[in-house]
Image (cartoon, rainbow, N blue to C red):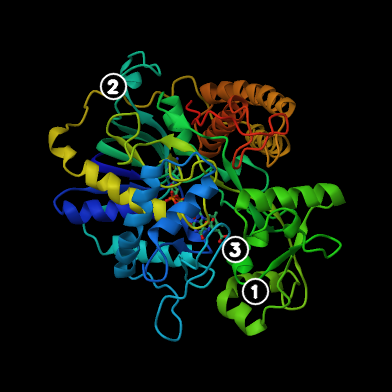
Amino acid sequence: MQTDFLVIGSGIAGLTYALKMAKHHPDKKILVITKTQADETNTKYAQGGIAGVMDEAKDSYSKHIEDTEIAGDGLCNNHVVEIVVKEGPERIKEIIKYGAEFDKDEKGEYSLGREGGHSEYRILHHKDVTGKEMERALLHEVEQTHNITLINHCFVIDIITQHHLGFLVTKSTPDITCYGVYVLNLNSNRIEKILSKITLLATGGNGQAYRTTTNPRIATGDGIAMVYRAKGRIENMEFIQFHPTALYEPGESPSFLITEAVRGDGGILRNKDGEAFMEKYDERKDLAPRDIVARAIDNEMKKAGTEHVYLDCRHITKESFIHHFPNIYEKCLSIGIDVTKQMIPVSPAAHYSCGGIKTDEWGRTSIQNLYACGECASTGLHGANRLASNSLLEAMVFGHRAYKDSADKISALDFKNDIPDWNAKGTSDPKEMILITQSVKELQQVMSDYVGIVRTDVRLHRAMKRLDLLFTETEDLYRSTRVSPQLCELRNIITVGYLIVKGAEFRKESRGLHFNTDHPGKSQLLQNIIL
Ligand code: FAD
Ligand code: SIN
């Protein structure tokens, strides 16, 4: 298969790029591939909304910039923050044109929500299912666009570079180039190669590296792992954001999110004794940035020996709660919790990867003709901690920027035609799936127990030793077994786990989401950890 533009991922980042490119180049083919169903993405599960300064008379770019940078704890790239905040509203207007609906008040103005770390009400939302609405609008627009082909159940194994032509490629090779990808096409059950002139990775996050996560099954950091294997640059992987309030429901995976917007509407965190504890930790109380709230909850749980705290919404009227959060109301009711009478048990869960594939301000990676945007990318927006509801915004801004930068490059590019077919010699069908499923569990256990909200040098060291063993066992399996999505995903989350631990080991300080009790202060040296 050959395509001018190959987009890997059908979430907000990939679809934004694909739509823009398709409209710009109506004569060119844009291929979007996705590993399960098109709408099974982190995007679909987004609840709270998308941050944007829609009316400068009521809010200001400078305040949104300041809030983003305060959350980022010194590591945001100021230029990128300014780009995202200032270009974001235009991108929001575009998705509204595609048909996405955001809630309005009785005056017909956007009803804006507020979340942790925001100094203003600036979050557009669609009830508590904003991502579902945005994904719907994007997919609908894709269906109407004649030159986009979307293939579901097509699992990308690796990106193709000079390495596959037999050349030695190292981190210092200056011109590593992407020629396309090898995919396991689950529709034909064959490994195929797709040659492309420009490739965009929009593969999303990696919450599945942890036992408790808000991320769906697809979030296994595939794009990040592929770029690392291809010797591209990855940065700031130690900054894993734990959402403070996932519904505590043992055995359920992924964890159901209780959006921060509930705290924006007055929800109060309480410990097992009913104490509203956040005022002990931060003057912004329940609406402090996520790293602070998640650590406070972790501390309260450890002190009391409990597995959760509570979110108290009993003072919010039933009408108001159901109006704003119908999905959460129904979910809680389905497990026997009437939020108007009972407190909601909540605990932190891995939620978002602030680091990822290093990109510049146009979404270019360190590999030629390869772009990345959305959660898999590290653009410099989030620094050490992402401000709530900035992720959907970033994905659209960089989907647009990557399109702008790559649209006209195509005329100077050709397909690389001498790429060998996938070599499956010496492999046989997997005999025991338990070898894979058990390793996934072990990896998640190690990451949750040793590389969670609070870290220490000893825990990180231990995690690395366990990961080494898992890596060796999995590479043996990979060499001898016919590839499957499960095996590839295991391989990818082990790589992501390694990158998180490595980044955490290098960072000898506590900053933003990375908190190491052996290095409690902040270093004077502001640096991104590039692996
Ligand atoms: P995704 O939407 O995750 O899409 C990834 C795509 O890549 C999928 O199509 C997947 O199939 C594909 N893919 C991955 N690997 C492969 C492979 N190997 N081969 C082929 N295809 C592959 N952010 C906000 O700004 N506001 C919110 O309110 C908000 N709420 C959230 C609530 C929840 C529960 C979660 C989980 C996240 C939330 N976020 C929120 C974060 C935000 O939703 C994500 O960061 C964002 O949607 C990521 O978009 P994306 O396009 O980068 O990736
Ligand atoms: C939420 O709704 O609390 C999630 C928002 C986000 O992750 O940005």
Q: Quadrant of ligand 2?
A: bottom right
Provide residue 483's location: percent of width, then percent of height.
49, 32
In this orientation, which residue lies closer to the viewer: 515 or 466? Answer: 515
Out of 276 and 496, give the one closest to the viewer.
Answer: 276
Circle 3 sits in a helix, a strand or a loop, which is it?
A: loop
Q: Is residue 77 left or right of residue 117?
A: left
Task: Give neighbour class at mark 1: few <14, some 14-19, many 20+ (Cα, 10 Å).
Answer: many
> Compared with residue 215, is residue 446 higher up or lower down, i.e. above or below?
above
Vertical arrangement, residue 152 with respect to residue 335, above or below: above
Q: Amino acid at mark 3?
A: Thr
Does mark 3's beta carbon lie closer than 8 Å to ligand 2? yes
Sequence order check, earlier mark of 1 and 3: 3
Res. 218 visible in picture = no
Q: Nearer the viewer, residue 54 or 102?
A: 54
- Regarding mark 2 in the picture, which secondary structure is present there? loop
User: Label 1 sits on what residue type?
Assistant: Tyr
Question: Sequence order check: which comes first, mark 2 or mark 3?
Answer: 2
Report, in whole angstroms, how far the alpha carbon at label 1 lies from the one at label 3: 12 Å
> Which of pointers 1 and 2 lies earlier in the amino acid sequence?
2
Q: Residue at x 34, y 48 (%)?
A: 398
Q: Which residue is mark 1?
A: 329
For the residues labelled 2 and 3, the Cα–Cα distance comes to 43 Å
The quarter of the rendered structure image containing the N terminus is top left
Picture disc at residue 113: none
Ligand 1 is within 8 Å of the C-beta of the residue at disc 2: no
- Residue at numbered disc 2: 175
Q: Is residue 397 left or right of residue 3?
A: right
Distance from the alpha carbon under mark 1 to that under mark 2 = 53 Å
> Residue 237 location, x and y as percent?
53, 35
Identify residue type, mark 2: Asp
Q: Which residue is mark 3?
A: 259
| Residue drawn 39% across the image and 37% down it | 183
